[in-house]
Amino acid sequence: MKQPLPEVFFDPNARMTENGYALTNGSIEDLARIGLTPEQAVGMAFTFNGGDDSAEGEEPVEIVFDGTVERHPKWGYLAISNSQGIYWRARQA
């Protein structure tokens, strides 16, 4: 069975490139909880979780993507989605 990737917060409103989101304080705090700085996390795989994206009266879902942390020359450290891009999953307990 495939091991789940560590989860790191991302802000869906912090999009800097077509598939890259700036790391925010929440992202950096999540990385620190697993013992990493953004620099140490470069190239590592994570599931980035943008939180609740539920429509009223519908099943609760989270907006997520799998990807890596990369260093961008203009925007700094970004969460970069893999080719699957953003998807929605049932909210985790």
Image (cartoon, rainbow, N blue to C red):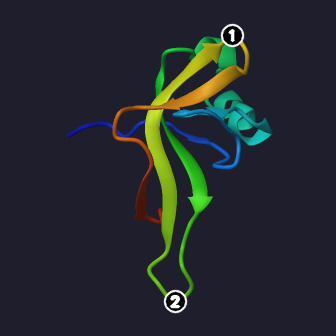
What's the distance in space between the residues labelled 1 and 2, CA to CA? 43 Å
Looking at the rendered structure, the secondary structure element under dot 2 is: loop
Of pointers 1 and 2, the one earlier in the residue sequence: 2
Task: Determine the residue positioned at 64% across, 15% down.
Answer: 72
Q: Quadrant of the N terminus?
A: top left
How far from the left and from the top, in percent, is residue 5?
42, 36
Relative height, residue 70 to residue 47 (above, below): above
Quadrant in which residue 28 is drawn: top right
How far from the left and from the top, in percent, is residue 85?
41, 42
Q: Quick check: can you spot residue 22?
A: yes
Looking at the rendered structure, the secondary structure element under dot 1 is: loop
Counting other residues with Cα less than 10 Å from the Cα at mark 1, is it few (<14), some (14-19), or many (20 or more)?
few
Seen from the viewer's position, the closer of residues 74 and 87 is 74
Seen from the viewer's position, the closer of residues 50 and 34 is 50
How far from the left and from the top, in percent, is residue 53?
56, 67
Looking at the image, which residue sits at the far front? 18
Relative height, residue 73 to residue 68 (above, below): above
The residue to which callout 2 is attached is: 57
The residue to which callout 1 is attached is: 73
Q: Quick check: can you spot residue 93?
A: no
Q: Nearer the viewer, mark 1 or mark 2?
A: 1
Looking at the image, which residue sits at the far left? 1
Counting other residues with Cα less than 10 Å from the Cα at mark 2, is it few (<14), some (14-19), or many (20 or more)?
few
89 left or right of 13? left
Type of amino acid under label 1: Pro
